[in-house]
Amino acid sequence: MRRLALTAAVTAALLAGCGNAARTANNPQTATPSPTPRARQVTVGQTVTLSGADDSGGAGRLRLAVKVKQVLPTATGHGAFQKPRKGERFVAVRFVLKNVGDTAYDDSPTYGANVVDTAGRTYDPTVAAVTAGPGFPKVVKLRQGQTASGYMVFAVPKKAKVVAVTYALNAGFAADRAEWRVP
């Protein structure tokens, strides 16, 4: 039920053109302190096991081994219509997700990701494909032991320097989160 409500809310926000997934460099969020525990800080290339709630109504806990494998500070859009707005550029982040829990993962991984610039502004993924490689499908389903890999694309101001990538399960609402420092 909670998953259905979240899906409906996200869909309505996207249709209205103001959803988190549509956030771009023209309307970034400023990072604010959160009541949740601090993110585990690691460097790009390291794997972190994250936990989250099982939205399917099961008694298990989601557990994904998440790795930020690569951060491309400037990525090229795939096709003539895949271009950032004026004053922006695409940043592409390659994630690798592995289900290491006993509960199936069935969610959209893009809702839990952000990039952070030197000013502390956060940027949500945007809908774009890049030439660096494939992205994730809208919904990723992983049984125990299965792995998925893909790029998430973020539109950021051309002058912004991305210094971190953050991720949490359950559309970013899980208390267990990680932050990969970008060199």
Image (tube, grey):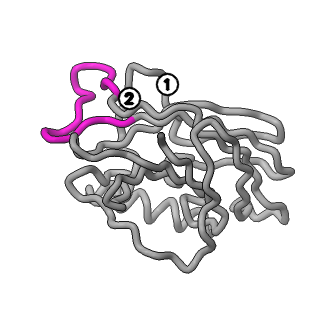
Residue 104 lies in magenta, yes or no? no
Q: Amino acid at mark 2?
A: Ala
Label 2 SS: loop
Where is residue 18? Give x, y as percent: 28, 60
Q: Residue at x 31, y 24 (%)?
A: 76
Q: Which portion, as a residue range, is magenta? A: 75-91
Circle 1: is it few (<14), some (14-19), or many (20+) Cα within 10 Å?
some
Q: Position of residue 15 (x, y in %)?
A: 31, 55
Amino acid under disc 1: Pro
Residue extending farthest to the front is 183
Magenta stretch holds residue 78: yes
Are the residues tagged 1 and 2 within 8 Å (C-beta)? Answer: yes
Residue that lies at the very extreme toward the bottom in this rendered image: 35
Query: Who comes first in sequence, dot 1 or dot 2?
Result: 2
Counting from the top left corner in percent of width and height, residue 13 is at: 35, 61
How packed mark 2 is, by other alpha carbons closer than 10 Å (few <14, some 14-19, many 20 or more), is many
Q: Is residue 141 in view from this perspective?
A: no
Viewer-proximal residue among 172 and 90: 90
Q: Residue at x 27, y 47 (%)?
A: 160
Residue at (51%, 40%) from the top-left corner? 138
Q: Residue at x 70, y 61 (%)?
A: 52
Relative height, residue 119 to residue 102 (above, below): below
Left-right relation of 113 to 45: left
Q: Quadrant of residue 26?
A: bottom left
**Residue 180 in the image, given as x and y percentages of width and height:** 56, 48
Q: Secondary structure at mark 1?
A: loop
Reading the image, the residue beneath label 2 is 129
Magenta residues: mostly which secondary structure? loop
**Is any atom of residue 177 visible in this view?**
yes
The answer to whether residue 142 is left or right of residue 72 is: right
Q: Which residue is mark 1?
A: 134
The relative height of residue 104 versus residue 91 in the rendered view (above or below) is below
